[in-house]
Image: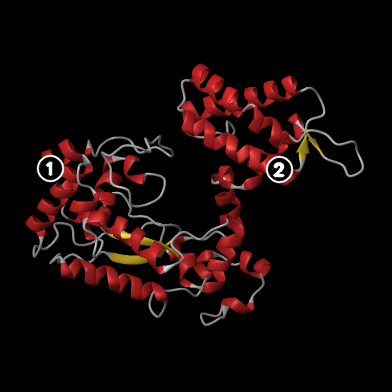
Amino acid sequence: MNAHHDLSQLSDEELLQIRICSLPLKIEGTWLEDCVSELYRELAMRDIQFRPLCYLADEWLTPDHEPVIGIPFFLADPALIRLEKKMMLEAEGSNREWCMKLLRHEAGHAINYAYRLYRRAKWSRVFGPFSREYTDTYRFRPYSRSFVRHLENYYAQNHPDDDFAETFAVWLTPHLDWRKQYAGWNALKKLEYVDELMNEIKDKSPMVKRGKRYWHLASLKKTLKTYYRQKRWDYSEDFPDFHDSNLIKMFSLSVQGEKELLSATDVIQRYRRAILNNVSMWTGEKKYVIGDLLKKIALRCRELGLVVTDSESSAVLKISTYITALTMNYLYTGQFSSEK
């Protein structure tokens, strides 16, 4: 592929046929270069010498123990940002504010590895053991004040390494009075420890100066079509149609001209409290998890125009059983689907 090919001139189908490693992309000369420069300025303002190398990868990442930052390749071109939004509903980090939040988080990982902070006994006491196994999913407590709130989905609760990275990101954010914002929170002790650490390492060279750039753009041989097929499967629960096949089995699609039937959404909302209480009681899951799931399913039933063709009691039994099965999957795997 011509290195100077204008991707905006290609159709989506033409883009999907291109191997990722063949895309004419780089950070230099794009809006990402400005974001990386801003990150470096923020580090310089704190007298931190380390400047993590940034490169284009398949997603936002800092490889384990490697003091480098991977930025998703699709952010380097407007046509690919548009394609990402079409295929995945959103493009993570596609505006400056969002991008900077993610860069600060990844910089926290990179600094942790560059200075080997995770090896310190106090680091483990404050954040937890770095050696704890990473998992694909995690369960969080939305009301906990032991963790800062920086990225969405309470990401600080994922792993001690992420707890540190999120705390660092809050500490680094310009014009943020974190002492005031987190006054009275247990998370304040973590912020104060990060402040202590950064004052100790400022003006010092990192112990690990270079890192391997895993999942670099040049190593991604798959086509965009294959990339999105896998990515959509991995994130299938985030798509509106995730429950469609099961909901259509439980209810029926309304047909114009038929006698007026009770909507599935109305039944769910009418018996919402009873379903919520019963599923929570028998599964032991927190009500906010079940409540969010019920809300999504009720909305999808409305979008599909689903109606109840049998008795209300039968419909409530079906939806209660379905919600219970999903909740049990989530309880033991962190995912609602049992097929992943």
- Residue 77, given in percent of the width and then of the height, sits at 50, 73
Q: Amino acid at mark 2?
A: Arg
Mark before the other along the chain sequence, 1 or 2? 1
Q: Residue at x 42, y 77 (%)?
A: 30
User: Would residue 324 be seen by someone viewing this image from the given angle?
Assistant: no
Residue 302: which numbered mark, if any?
2
Q: Residue at x 18, y 49 (%)?
A: 191
Q: Quadrant of residue 186?
A: top left
User: Would residue 191 be seen by someone viewing this image from the given angle?
Assistant: yes
- Residue 36, given in percent of the width and then of the height, sits at 32, 70
Front residue of this view, candidates 118 and 22: 118
> On the picture, is 16 further left or further right than 263?
left
Q: Residue furthest top?
A: 282
Q: Quadrant of the N terminus?
A: bottom right
Q: Residues within 10 Å of mark 1 (few under 14, many from 20)?
A: few
Q: Quadrant of the C terminus?
A: top right
Q: What is the distance, in whole Å, between disc 1 and disc 2 at their CAs?
A: 53 Å
Question: In what element is the residue under mark 2?
Answer: helix
Question: Are the residues flagged by discs 1 and 2 in contact, CB closer than 8 Å?
Answer: no
Residue bearing the label numbered 1: 120
Question: In what element is the residue under mark 1?
Answer: loop
Color encoding of the figure:
secondary structure
Q: Amino acid at mark 1?
A: Arg
Q: Residue at x 23, y 65 (%)?
A: 175
